[in-house]
Amino acid sequence: MSNSNKKKIILGIDPGLAITGYGLISIEKRKAKLIGYGAITSSAREKFGARLQHLYQELTKIVKKFHPDEVAIEELFFANNAKTALKVGQARGVAYLVAWQSKSIVREFTPLQVKQAITGYGLAPKQQMQKMVKLLLALKTIPQPDDIADALAIALCSAQTN
């Protein structure tokens, strides 16, 4: 961050079709503070297009409410099932579109980059990363489901790599 005294809001997104985790932090004087977090969910019983539309609408509400300066999105790095990877990729595309339309700075990070920034070790276990999120944001518990803690880690990664 070029001006370390200027407050910045970062929205982290862990995209998924069934669950998209999001986390909002503010950075001021190099200190991270939690603004909020949550999960956007959809059921496999819903039509695919309706699920993407729901994700678009909910992310748009969040962006309009909080006006993030930066949106950080996890990159899809691999999947065991190609069909699942394509659907997650489409959900990620919706998240990217919302971020782009908000005129925020859009940044992308791999899970390895996130773990490296948060724990100092890119191959750290997920639990170690989640414990660091709890510690860095002074939370009483690790947010659940995991997608939320991951989204907060993505936001913190973005803050630390400016």
Image (cartoon, helix red, strand yellow):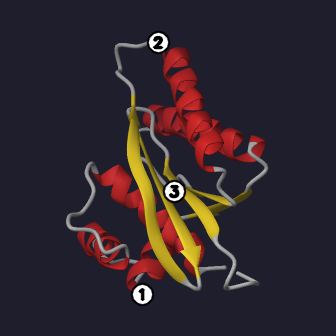
Residue at numbered disc 3: 77
First along the sequence among labels 3 and 1: 3
**Three-letter amino acid code of the residue under disc 1:** Gly
Q: Is residue 141 above or below residue 75?
A: below
Can I make out residue 80 in this image?
A: no
Residue at x-position 48% and y-position 40%: 85
Image quadrant holding the N terminus, namely bottom right
Kindly identify the residue that appears in the image at 39 percent across and 25 percent down: 42
Disc 3 from disc 1: Cα separation: 20 Å
Can you say whether 54 is above or below 156 in the image?
above
Q: Mark 2 and 1 residues: CB-CB less than 8 Å, in contact?
A: no
For residue 38, side relative to residue 4 (left or right): left
Image side of residue 58 versus residue 96, left or right: left
Q: Which of pointers 2 and 3 indicates the residue nearer the eye?
A: 2
Q: Secondary structure at mark 1?
A: loop
Instruction: Kindly identify which residue carries mark 2.
Output: 47
Q: Give percent across and percent down for residue 16.
A: 45, 40
- Few, some or many C-alpha atoms within 10 Å of disc 3 (few <14, some 14-19, many ≥20)? few
Mark sitting earlier along the chain (2/1): 2
* Callout 2 amino acid: Lys
Q: Is residue 109 above or below residue 41?
A: below
Comes first in the chain, label 2 or label 3: 2
Residue in the image at 63% along x and 61% along y: 108
> Which mark is on residue 120?
1
Residue situated in front as seen by the camera: 49 or 6:
6
Q: Secondary structure at mark 3?
A: loop
